[in-house]
Image (tube, grey):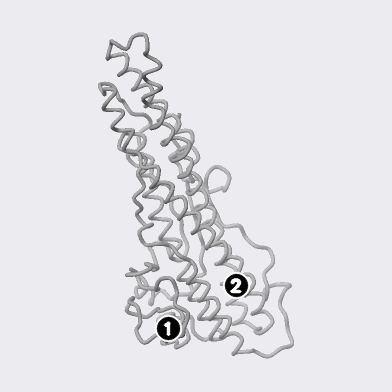
Amino acid sequence: MALRTDPETDGVTGGILPRPVEEWPGLGGMVRDGFEVDRAALRETGIRIVVDLNDVDIPYWWREPGFNAGDWGRANDVSVLFRRFSDDLFCVASDAVVECLAAACGVATAGQNYDIAENHGWLTRQSFWNRGHSPTTGVSPHAPTPRSSWSDVEKGYALSRYYPSGGFAADWEGIEGSHDYDGLSKEEIRALLMTGDENGMRNFSTVTKAIADDLDGLKGKLRSYADSVSYKWGGAAAEKAQGALKQIYEALGPLVDAHNSLSTLARTCADDIIAPAKARFDHAVTDENWFTDLFQDDDDNSARNFLREVDTQLSQGVLARFPQYVRIDLPGLIRPEDRLTYHS
């Protein structure tokens, strides 16, 4: 099998790219006229966006997860690829969430201020965000408490090197086309197989699917809020805010797809490859050599062939289906001179 090492960008052969939306509330043919700006309603909409952002729960440990398919050649390749990709995916997801918070500021202030670090009383109460990247104190005990704060200590959302627009390719450096297991004994191979952590991979799959669902839910709510805003606000400033919401909406699509893809592949790795291989090893190797069991070399050769078959399953079932490229394009609401504030 030839491993895929090229970053694909056409959305057909492994690239996960934004899908443009043709129509959007408050833009183009969907601009509504004949009303005054309802600032109170816009403030409430901004607050609702922030509250919904608190429901996007990406655990900080997920940035470099303890994904372990096993401690032998091909299984280690799979683990390394998952960890590298997860780290970069966390970064661009973080960019999108912070950008969404900036858009909420713009909506809440009718386009006057997109700076998250300003002293927005309403924002501090809802999101726990402050310029020092640490949880704020003095939050009302009656205010709804988000699952985790917006600080880099707690939730970890911050801007990455990819902000505002960019992408990353799956990092195949050091991943070999094949591995040599000559010289390994049956017992050594059995010990290697047992290092595969299918339960950890299942946990990774579950959490990754939950992240995908959270981002997809946020995506749908942004469209709904944009429609609501279009009835309360018009003009050039409103079109800028609507354009930003539309662009964030489009950027969330590849993030949802990438998380769903990783979740599916992690589950495949755990349930269809690693767990069955561990369960079948002793039976398969012993059955194959029942007539010549006195010759240890036959058991060793069978074990090596068994491990090569597992490698083929990992190559075809996981590596060949691994997403190759993710790109998002955000509006860049945070000014270049202010971005250092939001880097972790």
Q: Nearer the viewer, residue 202 or 158?
A: 202
Quadrant location, the C terminus: bottom left
Q: Is residue 159 above or below residue 198?
A: below
Residue at numbered disc 2? 243
Q: Is residue 17 above or below residue 31?
A: above
Q: Residues within 10 Å of mark 1 (few under 14, many from 20)?
A: some
What amino acid does circle 1 point to? Thr
Residue at numbered disc 1? 124
Which picture quadrant has residue 189? top left
Q: Residues within 10 Å of mark 2 (few under 14, many from 20)?
A: some
Quadrant location, the N terminus: top left
Furthest residue in direction top, as rendered: 291
Where residue 306 sits in the image (x, y, percent)? 38, 24
Q: Secondary structure at mark 1?
A: helix
Residue 81: which disc? Answer: none
Q: Secondary structure at mark 2?
A: helix
Where residue 120 sits in the image (x, y, percent)? 45, 86
Q: Nearer the viewer, residue 171 or 209?
A: 209
Q: Is residue 119 above or below residue 173?
A: below
Looking at the image, is mark 2 or mark 1 nearer the viewer?
Answer: 1
Query: Between disc 2 and disc 1, whose residue precedes?
Result: 1
Where residue 19 sits in the image (x, y, percent)? 60, 57
Which picture quadrant has residue 32? bottom right
For the point 34% across and 50% down, which residue is it?
Answer: 66
Question: Count of labels shown?
Answer: 2
For the point 37% across and 67% down, which residue is it?
Answer: 156
Q: Is residue 20 left or right of residue 293?
A: right
Q: Is residue 174 left or right of residue 31?
A: left
For the point 27% across and 25% down, which residue is it?
Answer: 187
What amino acid does circle 2 point to? Gly
